[in-house]
Amino acid sequence: MDAMTDAVTPVEVSELSFEQARDELAQVVAQLEQGAPTLERSLALWERGEALADRCEQWLVGAKQRLDAARGPVGGDA
């Protein structure tokens, strides 16, 4: 089982840039769409995909916060 996990998770998700996580997520989705040879492999791919999607969302939330901070306070509700 460790060999399969290593094959699916070569890099810690928390170390990936947005682009790396997005690209790997696309690969995971493609593999799931093709159908994995075993249920265990499908589950490992699904779990990796969930982690990658979460990582992408972290990057996007962080980017929005940085943009909001750069804009400064808004003068009023429009």
Image (cartoon, helix red, strand yellow):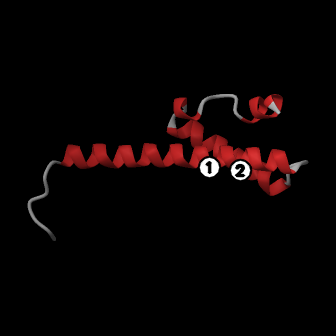
Residue under the point 37% across and 43% down: 62
Which residue does the numbered mark 1 point to in the structure image?
50
74 in relation to 67, above or below: below
Determine contact: label 2, label 1, CB under 8 Å.
yes
Instruction: Determine which quarter of the picture holds residue 22.
Output: top right
User: Of all residues shown, which one is farthest toward the right?
Assistant: 37
Work out whether residue 40 or residue 73 is closer to the camera in this orientation and state it. 40
Which residue type carries mark 1?
A: Glu
- Location of the C terminus by quadrant is bottom left
User: Of all residues shown, which one is farthest toward the bottom?
Assistant: 78
| Marks 2 and 1, how far apart at CA | 6 Å
Looking at the rendered structure, the secondary structure element under dot 2 is: helix
- Location of the N terminus by quadrant is top right
Residue 8: % across, % down: 75, 36
- State left or right for residue 58 relative to residue 13: left
Crowd band around label 2 with a 10 angstrom C-alpha radius: few (<14), some (14–19), many (20+): some
Residue under the point 39% across and 49% down: 61
Crowd band around label 1 with a 10 angstrom C-alpha radius: few (<14), some (14–19), many (20+): some
Work out whether residue 19 or residue 12 is closer to the camera in this orientation and state it. 12
Work out whether residue 46 or residue 59 is closer to the camera in this orientation and state it. 46
- State left or right for residue 42 relative to residue 13: right
Looking at the rendered structure, the secondary structure element under dot 1 is: helix
Which residue type carries mark 2?
A: Trp
Residue under the point 83% across and 46% down: 40
- State left or right for residue 62 relative to residue 3: left
Residue 18: % across, % down: 51, 39
Residue 7: % across, % down: 78, 31
Residue 64: % across, % down: 34, 49
Residue under the point 58% across and 40% down: 21
Q: Residue 46 carries which label?
A: 2
